[in-house]
Image (tube, rainbow, N blue to C red):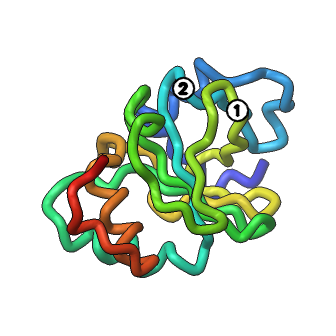
Amino acid sequence: MNRFAPRPVIWPEFLKLLRAADRSYPARSGLVAVRVGGVFDAASVPAGLAGPVIEQLQDRAGPIGPILSDALTEAVVFLLPPCSAENRKWPTAEGVRVLARDEVLLCPLPGFSVGGLAWLVPPGRLSAGDPAVLEPILAAALGEDRTQARS
């Protein structure tokens, strides 16, 4: 190993993900397979929506949470607190979905890009994103009117 090569930074929250990870991927791959539902929930959106949604999240006072980009599927995944995403009324646009409990999400180590997977906002000292904030911002980006009362 080159002694001048940058060392990966492992944030405390990512260590939780590593402990909960499926060990079927060799450590040298730079990927960990993490099951959704235990440590976090996740919402996946088309990559084309990511820019406007992230800008809106950054304009608000509060954490936006880790965000993973998957260039191969052209999706962006927002990590959310566990047990927080399933019972929300997410937009029904194609490509928007909440990852099911026990679904596996491949994650690269922070600071690395592996096979098209890269962190837009790495896991770190930031807390997970808030689905109550993400959901209406995503709906607005898709042009859905959320002014009517929910059923």
**Residue shown at 82% from the left, 60% from the top:** 115
**Residue shown at 42% from the left, 41% from the top:** 80
Label 1 Cα neighbours within 10 Å, binned few <14 / some 14-19 / many ≥20: some
Query: In the image, what residue type sits under mark 2?
Result: Gly
Residue 146 drawn above or below residue 122: below
> Observer-nearest residue: 63 or 43?
43
Tell me where residue 145 appears, x and y as whole percent.
32, 73
**Residue shown at 50% from the left, 73% from the top:** 50
Q: Which residue is mark 1?
A: 103
The part of the image, by quadrant, that contains residue 28 is top right
Left or right: 138 as drawn, with respect to 33: left
Query: In the image, what residue type sits under mark 1?
Result: Glu
Residue 70 drawn above or below residue 103: below
Is residue 102 shown to the viewer in this render? yes
Query: Mark 2 near mark 1, Cβ–Cβ under 8 Å?
Result: yes
C-alpha separation, residue under disc 2 versus residue under disc 1: 8 Å
**Residue shown at 67% from the left, 48% from the top:** 108
The part of the image, by quadrant, that contains residue 106 is top right
> Observer-nearest residue: 1 or 91?
91
Q: Which residue is mark 2?
A: 37
Residue 139 drawn above or below residue 149: below
Tell me where residue 32 appears, x and y as whole percent.
72, 35
> Observer-nearest residue: 146 or 112?
146
Residue 141 drawn above or below residue 28: below
